[in-house]
Image (cartoon, rainbow, N blue to C red):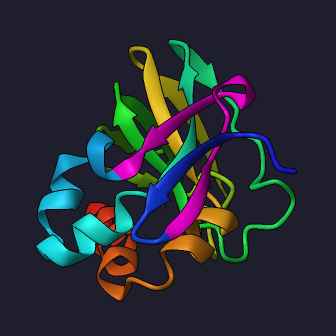
Amino acid sequence: MPRGRTLWAGGLTVLRPPPATGDWVQILQADPELAASLPQATREDAAVYTFAHAYWLEPGEWQPTGANGDAAGHLGLLVLDGFLVRHVRVIDRPPAELLGPGDLLHPWESDHTEPFVAGSRWDVLEPARVAVLDRRFAAVIGRWPDLVAGCSAGRSRGRAR
């Protein structure tokens, strides 16, 4: 039998991740802006299911690892607390992008600077907590299109403008 805390939700038994497996966070509580963008009915229905693994990044240079070998279906890393900066060097110009709570990161993706050669570096400016919106999370929230759109639409593309 799977281990975890059992919750009762509208006639369904739901397994919540056990605390021993790491820091789990309820996304709609951790990101009030996302919760506020959803219809009340969606918030109430999704609250029981929207848990994601979260971890802390210490200040200094950060070298992100891949999306567990398969980025397909992975929504990204949602910044919950703290600030990071991403430095991209293109044609000897080092633009920087400041990222903070509510931003969605895809650190395993290439920089898309063709035809120019580029390199990037990530720095954590203060302790930062990120939630992993992985394939499991994406599959769970798939029943709420408003939530899927809220997790991805303006959070990563809006930064590019």
34, 1: nearer the viewer: 1
Q: In this view, does 111 lie above or below 53?
A: below
Residue at the outermost front position: 11
- Count numbered badges in the picture: 0
Q: In this view, does 127 lie above or below 81?
A: above
Res. 139 image quadrant = bottom right
Q: Position of residue 25 (x, y in %)?
A: 46, 38
Q: Where is residue 156 in the image (x, y as percent from the top left)?
A: 37, 64
**Magenta span includes 24:** yes
The residue sitting at 41% across, 45% down in the picture is 26
**Magenta span includes 125:** no
Q: Position of residue 161 (x, y in %)?
A: 24, 68
Q: In this view, does 76 lie to the left or right of 101?
A: right
Q: Is residue 113 visible?
A: no
Q: In this view, does 151 lie above or below 89?
A: below
Q: Position of residue 149 (x, y in %)?
A: 34, 80
Q: In this view, does 129 lie to the left or right of 57?
A: left
Q: Can residue 151 be seen in this view?
A: yes
Res. 50 image quadrant = bottom left
11, 85: nearer the viewer: 11
Query: Which region is colored magenta?
Result: 12-27
The residue sitting at 16% across, 53% down in the picture is 33
Q: In this view, does 52 lie to the left or right of 97?
A: right
The residue sitting at 41% across, 31% down in the picture is 84
